[in-house]
Image (cartoon, rainbow, N blue to C red):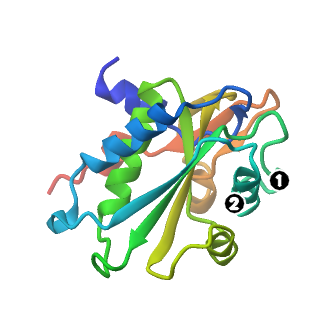
Amino acid sequence: MNMLDYIRKNRSCRRFVQDVKIGARELESMIEAARLSPSAANRQPLKYILCGDADSAKGREIFECLAWAAYLKDWPGPAEGERPAAYVIMLHDKTIHQNVLCDPGIALQSILLQAVYLGYAGCIFASVNRPRLQQTLSLPENYEILYVVALGKPAETIVLEKINPDLTAGDSIKYWRDAQGVHHVPKRSLEDLIINL
């Protein structure tokens, strides 16, 4: 596969084959991908907590702190058997610098591309019950929870669609699932993104 193929496969996956585990070295290789990525002013203020056993008490607590799919109103999240195998919690170490700038986006993309390379999929969560998770993990105040990444072997089919121009702007970008459970993700066309002046 070329790089664009990996990027096409890198979708927000929300249903996993729960009993397929991710090894510690594989998780560490995802953080290595983030570590090797560019960092604003090379400050490198990001740190990570790895949870390789999503079925553990810590893993179940992380699961309870996540809001799973804003556009799928009738879906509370993955059922038992479809839950992630592992989590990465991205932290901002405020003792290094007070601003993370563009670092989280770069690092998250690197983590997920490495996951895809290894045959896994992931989903980035910005909607996290941070106070509860901060307390659960007994994190010192200098660590701010930025994002949580759920990871595992994908158990769903995700397809990219052209945006439907007949829908209103807000509705046209909403992902959805069909009767067979296939997850559809509308994307703007390349022509819509490039402005020629």
Determine which residue is flagged by label 2. Answer: 66
Q: State the residue in front, 197 or 91.
A: 91
Q: Is residue 81 above or below residue 42?
A: above
- Left-right relation of 167 to 6: right
Q: CA distance from mark 1 to mark 2?
A: 10 Å
Circles 1 and 2, Cβ within 8 Å, touching? The answer is no
Q: Specify the amino acid type for callout 2.
A: Leu
Specify whether residue 20 is in view: yes
Specify whether residue 163 is in view: no
- Which residue is depicted at the point 68% across and 40% down? 84
- Left-right relation of 136 to 22: right
The answer to which of marks 1 and 2 sits earlier in the sequence is: 2
Q: Is residue 136 above or below residue 1?
A: below
- Left-right relation of 96 to 113: left
Q: Specify the amino acid type for callout 1.
A: Pro
Where does the image place residue 144, in percent across and percent down from the top left? 48, 75
Q: Is residue 17 above or below residue 72?
A: above
Where does the image place residue 126, in percent across and percent down from the top left? 56, 64
Q: Quadrant of residue 15?
A: top right
Q: Quadrant of the C terminus?
A: bottom left
Determine which residue is flagged by label 1. Answer: 76
Where does the image place residue 74, in percent across and percent down from the top left? 85, 53
- Which residue is depicted at the point 85% across and 39% down? 80
Badge 2: how crowded within 10 Å, few (<14), some, or many (20+)?
some
Q: State the residue in front, 133 or 158.
A: 133
Q: Quadrant of residue 183?
A: top right
Q: Regarding mark 1 in the picture, which secondary structure is present there?
A: loop
